[in-house]
Image: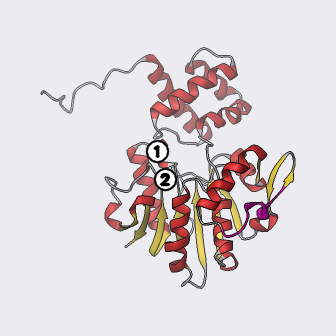
């Protein structure tokens, strides 16, 4: 099979893919948000869906709109980022943290946890409840970061639709919950509002895995179901940030469909609980 040489012309792209690359470049230059190394197939699908909301026919028209109307970029942000989560998602992950990771973290006098790509906060509050039940909240600081300001605001509010609580409760019990999940929330604003006491020792901050650097030394980094939306280069960048942030023998938790294997950082970690995608820095 003949392979193209180094001077071969680039593979021909269709018009939509060209428009997509130009749109992402414009967003980066205009707003300093870098989506150029996100999964193109996922971005293409979501941005094409956004055209109906804006009443447009093409991504080129969308580019023109956001270049001249900053308020429309704020609306578009909801399509650029994926806000899908639930409390105690993949309960076996949280059960493994409870039974295998937290007993080791308990040996530290103080603990820092980074929830990267925290979205609307479900994973953060799950971890807060877990640490509370294991008696570690008084010595733990949590840092919840995301690039979407609306998602961060929703995370900080801790308010979720009541019809989601039954699923949250089922996950909580499967994750080894020691109480009733209802002990942690009350009905408010037409939904379930999680206790204000959970917000103690939590810092919410804007942080981009595409462009920002390490800002803390962490004992646990939990970044789940975020890397699947990145290309290989951006995955390696993010994993490099996590490696640099973690203390020696610190822990990294990824999503069920994510792995360190085949990354440039695999050799820096041991597979602590491989089935649950929990790694320990060497």
On the picture, is 276 further left or further right than 144? left
Which residue shows up at 60% across the image and 66% down it? 176
Q: Which is more toward the observer, 8 or 158?
A: 158
**Observer able to see residue 206:** no
Callouts 1 and 2 close, C-beta under 8 Å = yes
Viewer-nearest of labels 1 and 2?
2
The magenta stretch is 178-186
Disc ID at residue 207: none
Q: Name the residue under label 1.
A: 228
Query: Which element is circle 1 on?
Result: helix
Q: How far apart are marks 1 and 2 (CA)?
A: 9 Å
Indicate the position of residue 149 as horizontal and vertical percent values. Answer: 70, 47
**Where is 158 relative to 252, above or below?**
above
**Where is 279 relative to 53, above or below?**
below
Which residue shows up at 69% across the image and 21% down it? 54
Residue 64 lies in magenta, yes or no?
Answer: no
Indicate the position of residue 84 as horizontal and vertical percent values. Answer: 61, 43
On the picture, is 219 further left or further right than 52? left
On the picture, is 55 further left or further right than 47? right
Q: Which color scheme does this rendered protein use?
A: secondary structure
The answer to which of marks 1 and 2 sits earlier in the sequence is 1
Indicate the position of residue 78 as horizontal and vertical percent values. Answer: 66, 36
Residue 179 lies in magenta, yes or no?
Answer: yes
Q: In which quarter of the image is residue 273?
A: bottom left
Q: Name the residue under label 2.
A: 255
Indicate the position of residue 229 as horizontal and vertical percent values. Answer: 49, 42
Query: Which element is circle 2 on?
Result: loop
């Amino acid at each position: 099979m003949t392979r193209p040489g180094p001077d071969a012309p680039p593979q021909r792209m269709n018009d939509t893919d060209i428009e997509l690359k130009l749109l992402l470049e414009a967003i980066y230059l205009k707003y300093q948000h870098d989506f150029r190394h996100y999964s193109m197939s996922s971005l293409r699908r979501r941005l094409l869906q956004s055209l109906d909301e804006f009443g447009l026919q093409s991504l080129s028209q969308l580019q023109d709109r956001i270049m001249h109307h900053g308020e429309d970029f704020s609306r578009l942000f909801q399509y650029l980022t994926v806000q899908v989560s639930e409390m105690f998602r993949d309960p076996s992950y949280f059960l493994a943290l409870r039974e295998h990771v937290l007993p080791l973290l308990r040996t530290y006098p103080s603990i820092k946890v980074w929830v990267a790509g925290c979205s609307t906060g479900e994973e953060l509050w799950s971890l807060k409840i877990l640490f509370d039940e294991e008696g570690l909240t008084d010595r733990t600081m949590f840092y919840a970061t995301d690039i979407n300001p609306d998602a961060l605001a929703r995370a900080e509010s801790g308010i979720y639709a009541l019809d989601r609580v039954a699923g949250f409760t089922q996950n909580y019990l499967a994750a080894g919950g020691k109480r009733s999940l209802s002990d942690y929330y009350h009905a408010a604003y037409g939904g379930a509002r999680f206790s204000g006491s959970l917000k103690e020792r939590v810092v919410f901050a804007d942080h981009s895995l595409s462009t920002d650097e390490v800002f803390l030394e962490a004992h646990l980094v939990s970044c789940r179901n975020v890397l699947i939306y990145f290309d290989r280069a951006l995955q390696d960048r993010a994993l490099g940030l996590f490696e640099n942030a973690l203390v020696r023998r610190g822990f990294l938790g990824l999503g069920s469909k994510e792995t360190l294997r085949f990354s440039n950082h695999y050799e820096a970690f041991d597979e602590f609980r491989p089935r649950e995608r929990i790694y320990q820095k060497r």
